[in-house]
Image (cartoon, rainbow, N blue to C red):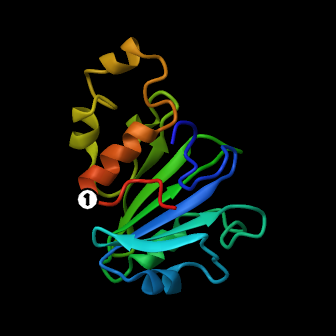
Amino acid sequence: MSEGMGWVDEPTGIDVWVTYARGLKPKELLKRLPQGAQPVVLGSSMGWAYAVERVDDSTARTESDDWAAPALQASSDGTDVLFFETRSWDPPSQFTYARSGRCVTSFGLGCGGEEEERAGDDDVLAAALEAAGIVGEDLHRYDEDEEFNLDGWETVRVICGFFEAPAPPLS
């Protein structure tokens, strides 16, 4: 995928939410998504179930201010949940890692360093993001290439690698 965070074989500008849940079957993940969720892709790979939802005005959870809340709910029994949210209307895209009903870590993706501003209970991705040159003291990759990680794809690769989750596209 060369532009944007489309996640499925779609043109840029179409927003999606991608939810991963470790150890669940796809139908189990679907039951944990908000009522009315209609994934365009539902599958599993590498021990993770995943659901890809196209986002528009009729998408489940658009009426809530806390769009990551379903990730917290889906993780309430100790399940690891990764939630990616593209946001063409309000960049940057967002990532949340939830476990046991709590936000372990959450941050923006790309846009020249959104990953520096992480929130949550445990900064589990800090070392992996630093090793990739996305955050930390050595940020020469940004100096060498002004487009480095602008779309957040490098961060997505680091996250998927860290959690041994399937990398997109998930179509």
Task: Identify the residue under disc 1.
Answer: 164
Sort mark 1 into few (<14), some (14-19) or many (20+) by Cα contacts within 10 Å: some
* Residue furthest out toward the top: 144
Residue 36: percent from the left, percent from the top? 67, 81
The residue depicted at 59 percent of the width and 53 percent of the height is: 9
Nearer-the-camera pick, 70 or 15: 15
Residue 111 visible in this rendered orientation of the protein: yes
Residue 54: percent from the left, percent from the top? 65, 62
Q: Is residue 75 above or below residue 116?
A: below
Residue 2: percent from the left, percent from the top? 52, 36
The residue depicted at 51 percent of the width and 49 percent of the height is: 94
Q: Is residue 132 above or below residue 123?
A: above
The residue depicted at 51 percent of the width and 87 percent of the height is: 31
Residue 129 image-quadrant placement: top left
Task: Indicate the secondary structure of the residue bearing disc 1.
Answer: loop
Residue 118: percent from the left, percent from the top? 39, 44
Q: Is residue 52 left or right of residue 61?
A: left
* Residue furthest out toward the right: 57
